[in-house]
Amino acid sequence: MIPRLVRACRGEAVDRTPAWLMRQAGRYLPEYRKVREAHSLLDICADAELTSKVTLQPLERFDLDAAIIFADILLPLVPMGIDLDFVPGKGPVIHNPIQSPLDVEALKLFDPRDHLSPTLEAITSVRTQVNQDTAVIGFAGAPFTLASYLIEGGPTKNFGRVKSFMSNEPEAFLALMTKLREVSCRWLTAQAEAGADALQLFDTWAGWLNPITYEKQVIEHSRFVFHNLKGTGCPTIHFAVGAPHLIELLSQAGSDVLGVDWRLSIDEAWSRFSMDCAIQGNLDPTALLGSEQHIRRAVIDVMQRVDRRPGHIFNLGHGMLPQTPPHSVTIAMDAVRSYEATAA
């Protein structure tokens, strides 16, 4: 049986809208917080059994159509020679950021099967534990987003360092993106071989670029990734935050599905790129902080705008917020199913 989400990614008609949520496994769940009391994020990612356990936690609570493997987009940077840490209250910190062309040259390519095997083992394990109609999603960071973290040294408010590097060291930036696209390709291919049914490329920070810069220095590298993933047989999803000004370009990178945030209504977003490309996302994560009436109204608005068109995957427009009440997710999933039952 082909998972419902995979069929929707391909634009095929399905019996119900597949639904999953970015960061569906994470800090908003008390069972996840209990795991974190004893283990750091990197500890979990280094242990296949813990990774599998955390990945499956939301599926044990909610009516979801996919399990996205618990990991972090920055994990592949460690075998490249990067000193990465996750600091409570601050997030990821890179202690040896990219500052010069020599730093780019020093970055190493690697085989994910040798260096990131716990995640791959967890994918295989999760695939055997969920039913055949539930998809397992693998993911990676897009070259530009990885480059941003590498150059900035962590989260940033203005991306001044990476933009300066792009303009002042264009050849080194090209070399960096070329290495990172190879890393993303290898990592996603390994996840597909381990049993992932679909693959998502997170270009979280692409929205900070203007269309000219994105087209000139970034899109070719995302396009390279998607082109090289075609041989896996897995449908691909492309997601960027804060990027309505890039939506046409993002859709031209070659993915099967385009993930969109909440800054455009989902029907307007879909009207701006090919009908052959499926769509995912759009619900504002803050909607899940509201009352039951507010949650149901927000979910129904998304569903009505799609109007049961094939190729729709219900999701948030970004990751789940840590303060989200778990019961709000139950309400949202019920709203999706109830709407479909009444609209049938």
Image (spheres, rainbow, N blue to C red):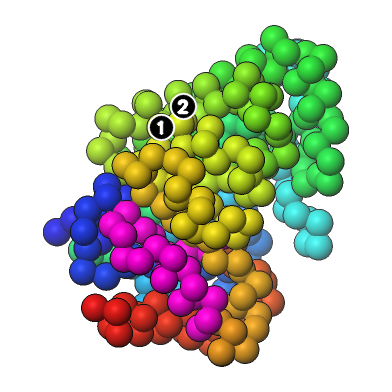
What residue is drawn where x is 44% and y is 41%? 273
**Which numbered circle lies on residue 223?**
2
- The picture places residue 72, in percent across and down from the top left corner, at 58, 50
- Relative to the observer, which residue lies in front, 309 or 56? 309
Dividing the picture into quarters, in which one does residue 38 lie? Answer: bottom right
Q: SS of the residue at dot 2?
A: helix
Q: Earlier in the sequence, mark 1 or mark 2?
A: 2
Q: SS of the residue at dot 1?
A: loop
Disc 1 to disc 2, C-alpha distance: 6 Å
- The picture places residue 203, in percent across and down from the top left corner, at 58, 41
- Relative to the observer, which residue lies in front, 75 or 233? 233
Question: How many C-alpha atoms fall within 10 Å of the one at disc 1: few (<14), some, or many (≥20)?
Answer: many
Q: Which residue is mark 1?
A: 254
- Relative to the observer, which residue lies in front, 134 or 130? 134
In the picture, the quarter occupied by the N terminus is bottom left
In the rendered image, the vertical position of residue 162 relative to residue 330, given as above or below = above
Question: Which stretch appears magenta?
Answer: 296-318
Residue 322 lies within the magenta run: no
- The picture places residue 142, in percent across and down from the top left corner, at 56, 36
Asked if the residue at tag 2 contacts the one at tag 1, i.e. Cβ–Cβ closer than 8 Å, the answer is yes
Outermost residue toward the left in this view:
1
Mark 2: amino acid: Arg
In the rendered image, the vertical position of residue 280 relative to residue 291, given as above or below = above
